[in-house]
Image: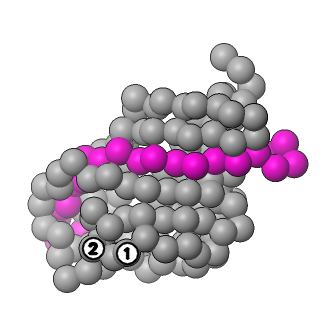
Amino acid sequence: MSADLHAIQNLLARFANSFDLKDWDALRACLAASVYTDYSDLRGTPPERMSNQRYAELRRIALQDLQTHHLSGNTDIELSGDAARAKVSTIIFRKNAEGQTLHTHCLYEFGLTKANAQWLINSIVQKVFWSDGQAAIHAGIVK
């Protein structure tokens, strides 16, 4: 495996683990300064571009009262010089203090760029296949 593929796989794992560990600094460190996001399938909000700081802060607020577990596989990475695209199949398990759950089965499509020998995520698109449970427990979903 090439060093770039390995670095990208580690970056994508660190990205997912940072949510579950609620390590918002680590999450921000996975991201380019500006990030395009499209969570319209889950959240009902339009795509937008934001700073990595805002991205991390929005996730902190939305997930502060939930336990999460992001499990990913079927990682498909396409390299093109200092740019890459990755598709990652993911199940996100969420549970609140009352035991209510919301689980989302989705495909992430990431855009990545390499700068100063470091890979960073500059685009995140989440395509939801389906969700099970109580959407109301997730503060980040438009109600």
- Inspect the image, locate mark 1, and give the three-letter code of the amino acid beneath it: Pro
x, y (%) of residue 114?
A: 76, 45
Q: Main secondary structure of the magenta part?
A: strand
x, y (%) of residue 135?
A: 18, 69
Circle 2 SS class: loop
- The structure residue drawn at horizontal position 84% and vertical position 42%, both measured from the top left corner, is 117
Circle 1 SS class: loop
Q: Mark 1 — residue?
A: 46
Question: Which quadrant of the structure image shows residue 61?
Answer: bottom left
Q: Is residue 101 magenta?
A: yes
x, y (%) of residue 67?
A: 34, 62
Mark 1 vs mark 2, CA separation in Å: 7 Å
Q: Mark 2 — residue?
A: 44
Q: How many marks?
A: 2
Please name whichever residue, 3 or 127, is drawn nearer the observer in this view of the structure: 127
Q: Can residue 115 be seen?
A: yes
- The structure residue drawn at horizontal position 12% and vertical position 60%, both measured from the top left corner, is 133
